[in-house]
Image (cartoon, rainbow, N blue to C red):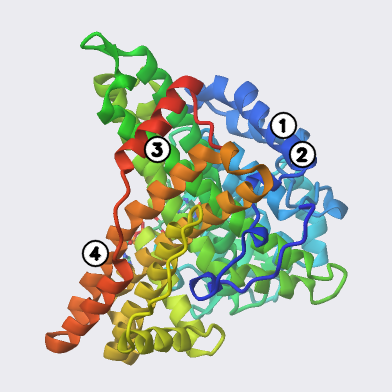
Amino acid sequence: MPEETLALVKGGSFLIQETSPEDVFTPEDFTEEHRMIAQTAQQFMENEVLPRIEEMENKEEGINEDLLRKAAEIGLVSAAIPEQYGGAGLDQISTTIVSEKTGLYGSFATTFGAHAGIGTLPIIYFGTEQQKAKYLPRLATAEWIAAYALTEAESGSDALAAKTTAVLSPDGKHYILNGTKMWITNAGFAQVFITFAKVDGEKFSCFIVERNFPGASTGAEEHKMGIRGSSTRTLILENAEVPVENVLGEIGRGHLIAFNILNFGRFKLGASAVSGIKYVTNEAIRYARERHQFGKAIIDFGAIQHKLAEMAVRIFCAESMVYRTVGMIDTAMRSIDQSSPLATTEILKAIEEYAVECSIIKVANSEILDFIVDEAVQIYGGYGYSQDYPVERCYRDARINRIFEGTNEINRLLITGMLLKRAMKGQLPLTAAARNVLNEILSFPSLEEEQNDLLSGERRILTNCKKTLLLAAGVAVQKHRDSISDQQEVLSLLSDLVIAIFAMESMLLRVLKGIARYGASKLEIQIKAVQICVHSALPEVENKAKQILAAVSEGDELRTQLAALRRFTKNTPLNLISLRQAIAQKLKEEGKYFLS
Ligand SMILES: Cc1cc2nc3c(=O)[nH]c(=O)nc-3n(C[C@H](O)[C@H](O)[C@H](O)COP(=O)(O)OP(=O)(O)OC[C@H]3O[C@@H](n4cnc5c(N)ncnc54)[C@H](O)[C@@H]3O)c2cc1C
């Protein structure tokens, strides 16, 4: 639990409110216990998992199970399981730290996340007492391993179109399931499958299916581009007999489980990307210091310094977003009376409240991960293309993250979709905020003197990016009204603006909090990182806003809007090249990522 109490904030409110630095959680706020958990998980990965990568990549059997059981022995697997069911019952921040650290090896992160995350959480949050008592203690020790079976060959993104059926047996004792689930992580060795099927072909519902139930079996291993050390198979249900007491949640309300659990999954995926990007960046720094061309270490070339500095900035950004968000979730969770019969409903409401942030983190961090592995391969040159070096595997392993837990296209649409829905329901005053921006455009520009404090320029850019988003969103919604959900390109561009704002702000607030605590001189490099992030984001925000405005307006109307946009995006550029050089120089001296 963090030592300070953070204010409870509404999900998505960052777009219209100023957040004060004291109200964000940052990795610098970890307690002693959090640091110990981080160290334990890191050591486990380094001592137990990394030495076995080759065997796992070669698909030697039994290793994943063995590693999960070892992780269970030191409490990593059961972090989210309540103590009365044999778990460690840790706070959200601790479970996020575990997800971050287990991300060090993509295959293990996937195996671990499918078991301890999306495979176990449905029982924690939706299980009956009997279901919890039967399954959770076995899942806590990894005696039984869990999987999450939602996708089918014909229904991936459109998960509710599943064809798997469930029909009550004539004696009323079983549901008889028929269908095939596709791409199921851990299917090679899982005993417990959280499985979705439609009762009577209509009511989307969730079932706990055990591997040894009559009629349940799994297919052959898929041959994948990456995460080859993880198991992915079909789950085949041929008149599979599932006892009625294994219905999870209510018949016809399986979507609540599927979507709420995916929110966790998305957030944890973003968290686990953080250790992957630190690892790859450290490998790239090490290689760039050792590799000489033209009589120089390649780290001394500006083009390589540019890459390494950008990688470091993005790590700092990814990490800031993850811990800011878990701080919000943790604060909301701690305000819930866990002994109340309504606790589970409240917990789910808390997670749903931050569904926008969870999707932001999924999209942003999977793309940061891809950017970083790609640049790492480039820094390695031809050797990056060789299986003899780890970056080749990391490059392949990273790619899946933009696809599973909802593709990034779907998550982008969800981000704007959820925000617009909340605005329309009056839950988030986005409409009023957009109206204020439109009024501001019609008034004369204010002649207020600009502040000149440290990072005040970046704060101003952030505020103006929020106004830019509200301008573009306001104009787009006014134009398309009820058919806005059909405008996918516009919605996706708006999502990019939302993501950029959350990214900039999370970094900025983290650094401002750090400056207040340790003084600016201790954070020179982090300040530079924020400047790079904010000043690079601004022209991208401007460009995307222009695309939106040009798609929805024309003539004089468009010209007025573009003039307003210029007002919000006016800025004197900083010398980002020298800022990157300073960061790269320090990366070279330290020999590793050092910003956190
Ligand atoms: C290695 C691996 C492990 C996996 N593990 C699991 C697991 O454990 N459990 C599980 O249930 N599933 C799992 N999946 C499945 C995964 O979640 C799906 O692959 C994913 O949801 C996408 O579905 P799809 O592959 O059918 O693609 P599709 O839905 O067919 O999408 C194809 C393309 O169309 C786009 N698209 C689709 N619909 C829209 C739309 N409405 N608007 C705009 N664009 C759209 C998508 O973004 C994508 O680019 C796994 C997949 C892989 C590859």
Numbered label attached to residue 93: none
Q: Nearer the viewer, mark 3 or mark 1?
A: 3
Image height of 266 relative to 303, above or below? below
Is residue 516 at all visible to an observer of this figure? yes
* Number of the label disc, if any, that sits on residue 311: 3
Which quadrant of the structure image shows residue 292? Answer: top left
Where is mark 2, residue-wise?
Answer: 75
The answer to whether mark 2 and mark 1 are in CB contact below 8 A is: yes
Q: Amino acid at mark 2?
A: Gly
Residue picked out by circle 1: 40
Q: Is residue 148 visible?
A: no
* Residue drawn where x is 70% and y is 44% of the image: 144
Closer to us: 221 or 529? 529
Q: Determine which residue is flagged by label 4.
A: 543
Q: Quick one: SS at disc 3?
A: helix
* Horizontal and vertical percent position of residue 530: 45, 49
The disc labelled 3 sits on which kind of residue? Met
At label 4, the amino acid type is Asn
In the image shown, does 152 or 518 lie closer to the viewer? 518
- Image quadrant, ligand 1: bottom left
Residue density around tag 2, few if under 14, some if 14–19, many if 20 or more, within 10 Å: many
